[in-house]
Amino acid sequence: MNLELVTELPDDYEAFRYYVEDYDELSDSELDALVEEIAAPIIKAVDCTQCANCCRSLDVYLTPGDAERLSQGVLIPLSEIIDHPRAEMEGEWGVFKQQPCAFLNEKLCSVYEHRPTSCREYPAFTPDFRWLLGDLLGGVGICPIIYHTIEELKKRLKW
Ligand code: SF4
Ligand code: SF4
């Protein structure tokens, strides 16, 4: 499976988003099931430890529970996580805006056992793939899992 960054994105993704929004041969739950079926073998085939593009290029969102777990797991005072100069609060959520992520060690997460939920769930295709698709398309050039899943979905939906 190719892990290279996709630098030349097909210019039809926006049109594909509208196609999926209007695609009425599958209900939302049927579409979710199809996307999960497509993504499962791709997720298995991709070795994230050889990629780490998401850790290098995305903001990291932390729930209060994530911050607490991280603090206890890596023995950093909670205040140091919340008041980190590159962190911001959005309501109850914290956002690490440092890129690459401060916890990335070459291509490996140095706090893997204690990593935030948003890291554990990335890339999330469901629930409600139709609604998530707009955001997911923003990750096509970053994440090979997203790229290959979307490309296979295009074929299955006869795009
Ligand atoms: S906490 Fe770990 S998994 Fe999450 S972005 Fe940082 S390095 Fe990546
Ligand atoms: S989730 Fe995607 S971007 Fe992140 S390491 Fe895995 S393949 Fe790369």
Image (cartoon, rainbow, N blue to C red):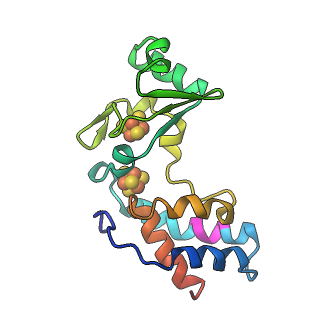
Q: Residue furthest bottom?
A: 158
Q: Is residue 146 above or below residue 72?
A: below
The location of residue 124, given as percent across then percent down, is 56, 54
Asked if residue 112 is among those painted magenta in the image, a careful observer would answer no
Q: Is residue 68 above or below residue 96?
A: above
Which quadrant of the view contains residue 15?
A: bottom right
Q: Main secondary structure of the magenta part?
A: helix
Which quadrant of the view contains residue 63?
A: top right
Which quadrant of the view contains residue 73?
A: top left
Tell me where the magenta segment starts and ends, as one range. Answer: 32-36
On the picture, is 32 further left or further right than 41? right
Asked if residue 33 is among those painted magenta in the image, a careful observer would answer yes
Q: Nearer the viewer, residue 125 or 6?
A: 6
On the picture, is 103 further left or further right than 157? left
The location of residue 32, given as percent across then percent down, is 66, 66
- Image point 65% across, 67% down: which residue? 33
The location of residue 71, given as percent across then percent down, is 46, 17
On the picture, is 151 further left or further right than 47? right
Q: Nearer the viewer, residue 37 or 48?
A: 48
- Image point 46% across, 63% down: which residue? 146
- Image point 33% across, 48% down: which residue? 52
On the picture, is 3 further left or further right than 30? left
Numbered disc total: 0
> What quarter of the picture does the N terminus occupy?
bottom left
- Image point 46% across, 27% down: which residue? 87
The location of residue 14, given as percent across then percent down, is 56, 73
> What quarter of the picture does the C terminus occupy?
bottom right
Q: Is residue 75 above or below residue 127?
A: above
